Image (tube, rainbow, N blue to C red):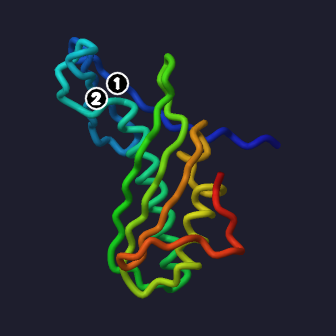
Amino acid sequence: MAQAKKQILVSAQWLGRRRFEAKGPSGYPLVMDSNAENGGDGSGNSPLELVIMGLIGCMGIGVTKLLEKMRQSLESLEITADGIRADEIPYGVTEVHLTFDAKGEVAASRIWQAIKLEAEQYCPVAASLKAAIIPHLVLNGVETAPPADIPKPE
């Protein structure tokens, strides 16, 4: 017997010019707009910003959940994304550099393992993007390379 497909129903109401208010199953409203150059007022996040924010949120939720299961004592985590766009229309994101700035009693090998699992297996946002996702780790203020047994993403 075939399983029902999982759906996420999202709707957006046009508010004039280039502005939209969207709501998903959680019910929280979110305003999107374009900059003045593209006919908007810049009164909300752009849809592309939201895609990258979604990636950061998805990766962060998954990494912190995995580290908790690994019994790692994470004190803080800030994730920064640098999205690189194509030079041609539609100017899509071709790669995203994610910098995980973590602090706490966390083994570098464990956080790299969590990052790799999320980027390659568990994060549905990462799985939905065509862009290459290139993680970087700063652990307790020190840039930390992945261990040899965790291949560097291309």
Seen at 34% across and 34% down, the residue is 23
Q: Left or right of 75: which side holds 131?
A: right
Is label 1 in contact with label 2 (beta carbons under 8 Å)? yes
At mark 2, the secondary structure is strand
Q: Left or right of 13: which side holds 70?
A: right
> The residue under label 2 is which amino acid type?
Met
Above or below — where is 65 with respect to 19? below
**What is the distance, in whole Å, between disc 1 and disc 2 at their CAs?**
9 Å
Please provide percent x and percent y for residue 38: 28, 14
Seen at 57% across and 69% down, the residue is 114
Seen at 69% across and 74% down, the residue is 148
Q: Which residue is mark 2?
A: 32
Please provide percent x and percent y for residue 136: 49, 62
Of the numbered discs in the image, which one, if any, rests on residue 30? none
Label 2 packing within 10 angstroms: few (<14), some (14-19), many (20+): many
Q: Quick one: 55 or 134, which is closer to the camera?
A: 134
Above or below — where is 9 with respect to 63? above
Between circles 1 and 2, the one closer to the viewer is 2
Q: Which residue is mark 1?
A: 12
Please provide percent x and percent y for residue 134: 55, 53
Please provide percent x and percent y for residue 154: 65, 51
Q: Left or right of 41: which side holds 67?
A: right
Q: Left or right of 58: which side holds 131?
A: right
> The residue under label 1 is which amino acid type?
Ala
Label 1 packing within 10 angstroms: few (<14), some (14-19), many (20+): some
At mark 1, the secondary structure is strand
